[in-house]
Amino acid sequence: MTEKTHDGGTPLSEQPTSAGTHRHGHQHEGAQQGGLNLHEDADNAVDMWDGMYRERTKVWSGNPNPQLVAEAKDLKPGRALDLGCGEGGDALWLAQQGWTVTAVDVSAVALERAAAHAAETSHGDRITWQQQDLTEWTPEPVFDLVSAQFLHSPLLPWRDSALKAAAAVAPGGTLLIVGHHPHGLPSWSHHHDSGMFFTPEQLAGALRLDREPWFVNVLTDRERSVVGPDGESGTTLDTVLRAAKHA
């Protein structure tokens, strides 16, 4: 895949492992996100994300993203797709809940770490790791849950990634998209392009959620406490969508 801000841990504003929170990290502008450089001058998405992950032996904490836990903890397990799995925190949490998970990321470095970590647990055999670039890959609509957590990238418009996530949901399945609200980033954020992010209204419009086959369960923005790069406290605003696809 080509985007994602976190890899099964916590998003952008929660800080990398130095602050003990993040789990996958991909952002934009070649700028730093919590001290991480995105190599925007790379020739392709693989080089960009692999370069970012190689800078540290561990980027994210491995904790699941909090909105994933909040929205998926009561769902009946089935087949799940984790788009932009990074170092695998979300995928492993889903496997622990009983899901059979296909975890996709563009970075082979991140996937290698994720698979190694999962192999140390009793749930790793429930996860299939796949290297894919969302600009080229379209999954089949066979998943009971599709989770796209902070799938932000300078190389793929968020509308494209959201539409691909929605297309992968099987009839009767659930779509869960979480992203950064353009007006709710913490003061220390290095993100300057608000077009990278989306409001609930923008997301609903892009996915045409006012018509079949979707029933919207949750569409909101949700404030969350975060810790900055120097240990300072702050808040960030998440855009959260959970929708069911009619059978």
Image (cartoon, rainbow, N blue to C red):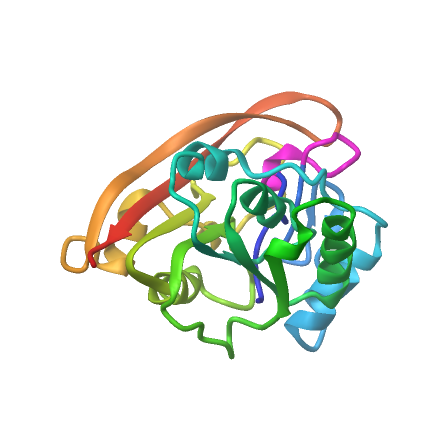
Q: Is residue 70 magenta?
A: no
Q: Is residue 5 above or below residue 208?
A: above
Q: Nearer the viewer, residue 52 or 30?
A: 52
Residue occupying image coordinates x 41% and y 49%: 177
Query: What x and y, as percent, mark residue 31?
Result: 68, 52
Query: What x and y, as percent, mark residue 110?
Result: 73, 58
* Lateral position of residue 96 relative to residue 240, left or right: right
Q: How many numbered dots are placed on residues in this image? A: 0
* Quadrant including the N terminus: bottom right
Q: Is residue 167 above or below residue 117?
A: below
Q: Nearer the viewer, residue 196 or 238?
A: 238
Q: Is residue 17 magenta?
A: yes
Residue occupying image coordinates x 69% and y 65%: 107
In the rendered image, the residue lying farthest to the top is 233
The quadrant in which residue 49 appears is bottom right
Q: Which residues are magenta?
A: 10-21
* Lateral position of residue 50 relative to residue 221, left or right: right
Q: Is residue 140 above or below residue 54?
A: below
Residue occupying image coordinates x 27% and y 46%: 201
